[in-house]
Image: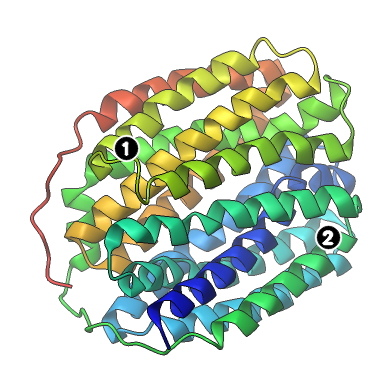
Amino acid sequence: MGRFAVNNYIRCATFFQNSGLGMIFVFMPIIAKEATVSIFEIGIIIASFSFAQILSELYFGRISDRYGRRLLFIRVGFVACAVTFGLHYLAEDSATLLVARVGAGITYGIMTPAMLAYAYEAGREKKKVASVVSFHALGWLAGIAAAGITNDTKLIFLVAAGLFVAGFIASTQLPDTRARPERAPGTTRGIISRNRYLFLALLLRHIGAASVWTVLPLMITEQLGGQLYHISIVYVSNTLTAFVIMTLMASRIQISHITKFKIGIGMTTFVFVGLLFVTEWWQAMPFMALVGGTWAFLYIGGNFHLMEHNPKSTSTGIFSSTISIATVIGPVTAGTIAFAYGYSTVLYFAIAIIVVAFLVSLRAPYKNATIAN
């Protein structure tokens, strides 16, 4: 199979993987509120997915490197996600929804590190890999748009399950290439130690972001006069910008990966400052577009910097798990703050913590000692 065809199938699999997740993510605060009226419980339900994903990505990312297997974890993940996301349809109360979210987090974490590592290893020219990874954002765009079109907080789970089935079908066309097994002891600990400022900056930034994403859909519908489909419109501006910027990184944006990461962290601050002044739902769109651009910079920059200097699936698994840890802490924090002080206070919290994240990111070195992989 030609490399062009392989990359296109990777694009398809990446697209369906992220469209399935994106379809659920944006509406989850609304879905959780249908199961419970407690804003704190809403935060717990949202955080449960990421808590399960943390452990899953750390474990399966390391196993993928240890045995040099990528495609096995990708295919198993697609099938398992089709089942667990579809089971959300049967959740009728907060307890069953919580169980469904934990199951979805575990199954989604099976394939995430392996997918990114497979895409990176399949690219003959690493600068072209960004154009493949950009379908991560395009998938989110399609999933969010599909959720708005579906406009049904139950039916979207069945559509998401179908998207994961489509991703599995695309993955059956990929060659089962093997990476060299990486079995050195202490690898995970060493990666975290060498890249501690990168991971800490990412953690702090995403705690702030996840806090805002927990309350923003509620703000749009309760305070800014928006409807369910308006949430999709606002978030589409985010993912469309991320897709464009990620694509441009393949050929136009020629700066070091760690610099991209630092730019992405720092520029996020302006997003939440701007959201403080929004009075109509549509006014959130330019700020969501900006956060899409910052996400593209920090996601491509951070992951590619790690893969250049560390075992790929393990390091990207830690990167993704760091995001998941933040997505556990962020919603719980947002729920607590919003319960006590209201939605807008969450934005002030996000601004403060992201400023700290940027200062930490400045300590991240431009080079790491490369580990054989």
Residue under label 2, please give it.
156
Residue 333 at least partly seen: no
Q: Is residue 93 left or right of residue 350?
A: right
Label 2 sits on a secondary structure element that is helix
Q: Quadrant of residue 331?
A: top right
Q: Is residue 17 visible?
A: yes
Q: Quadrant of residue 229?
A: top right
Q: Is residue 101 left or right of residue 314?
A: right
Q: Amino acid at mark 2?
A: Ile
Q: How many marks?
A: 2
The first of marks 1 and 2 along the sequence is 2
Q: Residues within 10 Å of mark 2 (few under 14, many from 20)?
A: many
Image position of 321 with respect to 249: above or below: below
Callout 1: SS:
helix
Measuring from the top left, give residue 373's x and y in whole percent: 18, 73
Placement of the N terminus among the 4 image quadrants: bottom left
**Dot 1 and dot 2 residues touching (CB under 8 Å):** no
Give the left or right position of residue 50, taking residue 89 as reference.
left
27 vs 119, nearest the viewer: 119
